[in-house]
Image: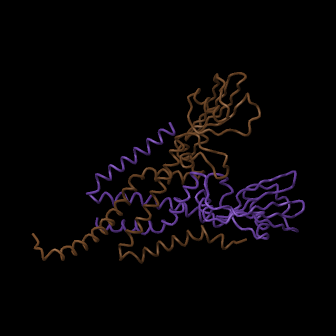
């Protein structure tokens, strides 16, 4: 029993330390997401134009991941790397607008299929916007497109691992608390107060 | 009973023990704060953890909510609101219908005799189309299951970084948003108190540094490193 306690305590400590920077990213970004506020002014977007691009034929007719894969070569040649957020097709102008995101920076590639040229606009250089983006990724939208960049696939795995480890920390934390007999009464009172606040609030909002 | 000659010595001793008591007191309360916060916010943390997983894994079949939604359509008589702004008129209509929630007005209104807007709260979405010339309103009420409620609770803040025009207009949305702040602040405090507790365990510093260093390196890569590597 003593060994189990010591082992659980060590796991609680080391897993907690490992995920603590990731937990801080999720926690700090809550303030910005909950109040739609981003510190620091956005720098002026920088644009450049590129021409004579080799664009795969019929790329505008593809959709989803297939279209992203077909365009990846064009983006690489433009020096644009990152997660393709979505692709907007403007058929009557023969254009594809492709926002590509590296956490903290968004580059929009406005690809003209007729002239084989592109306007590349880069905006944002901000740690806070990187944290907000990471908090929301991969998220619930455009699931078939999400994870088209290797780092976002890695982040998806890390975000999941953070949640599973946080759940483990909460359960192991409860176990470690129950061992402290002197703290049981006040701990139970706080647990009950937390449950009352949570379920009361959820009931009021969702009833 | 100490003699008068003992007084200076006892003063030194009491000063030392006072400083030690303060340090010990801080250590004890730091530890208590760590698990008190954890216990108070436990249900909030479980909810945000579980709903975060659901948002990232929309394909999980057991947690589907959209195909299981219930939609009911009703038509109600309305009294034309006297207030000037679209938001005030929408709030007036909600009072008439006995509906509560966060209002989102549709695109720019072109016909003053009509008002179309949505009202949402976790588990419920109302699409309201009011026609003041007929003094009638169509209400489409969509109701979601518990999985839908969970997912919405995670993101229910009533504002958006992408659209600054959207403002909170329901008091409970504000309460919920501030409770999210409280949970986030609680989690940050828990992390800080854990650092202090860990540093006090001399024998665990090395492995702790490895674990923290690994987590920090991974975090740095995503928050700063990728922008630096792919500086384009």
Splitting the image into 4 quarters, where does residue A83 fall? bottom right
- The quarter holding residue A131 reads bottom right
Choose between B129 and A74: the one closer to the eye. Answer: B129
Residue B197 to residue B140: above or below: below
Residue drawn at 81 percent across, 60 percent down: A110
Residues A205 and B26: in front is: B26
At x 69%, y 63%, the residue is: A124
Q: Quadrant of the N terminus of chain A?
A: bottom left
Name the colour assigned to chain A in the rendering.
Answer: purple
The spot of residue B86 in percent (x, y) is: 67, 34
Residue in the picture at 22% in, 75% down:
B12
**In the rendered view, how is the structure colored?**
by chain
- In the image: residue B17, left or right of residue A194: left
Which of the two residues, B122 or A38, is positioned nearer the viewer here?
A: A38
Image spot of residue B113 (x, y percent): 73, 27
**Residue B222 at x, y = what percent?**
60, 68
User: Which of the 4 image quadrants contains residue A125?
Assistant: bottom right
Q: Nearer the viewer, residue B47 or B68?
A: B47
Outermost residue on the front side: it is B4
A43 displayed left or right of B59:
right
Residue A40 position, x and y percent, is 63, 62
Hue of chain B? brown
Location of residue B108 with respect to B188 vertically, above or below: above
Looking at this view, name the residue that lies furthest to the right.
A115
């Amino acid at each position: 029993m003593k060994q189990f306690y010591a082992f659980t305590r060590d796991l609680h400590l080391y897993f907690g330390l490992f995920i603590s920077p990731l937990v801080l990213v999720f926690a700090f970004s809550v303030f910005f997401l909950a109040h739609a506020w981003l510190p620091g002014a956005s720098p002026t977007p920088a644009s450049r134009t590129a021409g004579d691009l080799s664009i795969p034929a019929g790329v505008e007719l593809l959709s989803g991941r297939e279209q992203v894969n077909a365009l990846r070569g064009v983006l690489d040649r433009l020096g644009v790397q990152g997660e393709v957020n979505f692709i907007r097709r403007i058929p009557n102008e023969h254009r594809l607008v492709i926002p590509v995101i590296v956490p903290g920076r968004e580059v929009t590639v406005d690809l003209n299929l007729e002239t084989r040229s592109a306007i590349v606009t880069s905006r944002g250089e901000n740690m806070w916007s990187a944290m907000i983006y990471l908090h929301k990724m991969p998220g619930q939208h455009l699931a078939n497109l999400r994870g088209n960049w290797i780092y976002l696939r890695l982040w998806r795995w890390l975000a999941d691992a953070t949640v599973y480890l946080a759940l483990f920390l909460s359960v192991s934390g409860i176990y470690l608390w129950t061992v402290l007999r002197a703290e049981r009464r006040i701990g139970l009172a706080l647990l009950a107060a937390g449950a009352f606040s949570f379920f009361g609030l959820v009931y009021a909002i969702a009833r | 009973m100490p003699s008068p000659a003992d007084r200076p010595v006892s003063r030194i001793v009491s000063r030392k023990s006072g400083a030690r008591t303060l340090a010990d007191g801080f250590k004890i309360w730091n530890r208590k704060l760590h698990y008190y916060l954890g216990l108070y916010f436990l249900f909030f943390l479980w909810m945000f953890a579980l709903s975060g997983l659901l948002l990232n894994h929309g394909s999980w079949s057991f947690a589907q909510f959209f195909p299981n939604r219930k939609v009911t359509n009703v038509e109600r008589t309305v009294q034309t609101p006297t207030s000037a702004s679209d938001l005030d008129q929408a709030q007036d209509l909600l009072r008439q219908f006995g509906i509560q929630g966060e209002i989102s007005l549709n695109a720019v209104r072109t016909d003053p005799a009509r008002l179309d807007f949505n009202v949402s709260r976790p588990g419920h979405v109302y699409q309201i189309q009011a026609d003041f010339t007929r003094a009638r309103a169509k209400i489409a009420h969509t109701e979601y299951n518990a999985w839908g409620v969970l997912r919405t609770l995670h993101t229910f803040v009533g504002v958006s970084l992408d659209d600054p025009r959207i403002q909170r207009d329901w008091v409970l949305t504000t309460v919920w948003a501030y409770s999210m702040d409280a949970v986030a602040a609680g989690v940050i405090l828990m992390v800080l108190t854990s650092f202090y507790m860990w540093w006090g365990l001399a024998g665990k510093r090395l492995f702790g540094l490895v674990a923290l260093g690994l987590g920090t390196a991974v975090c740095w890569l995503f928050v700063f490193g990728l922008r630096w590597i792919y500086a384009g």
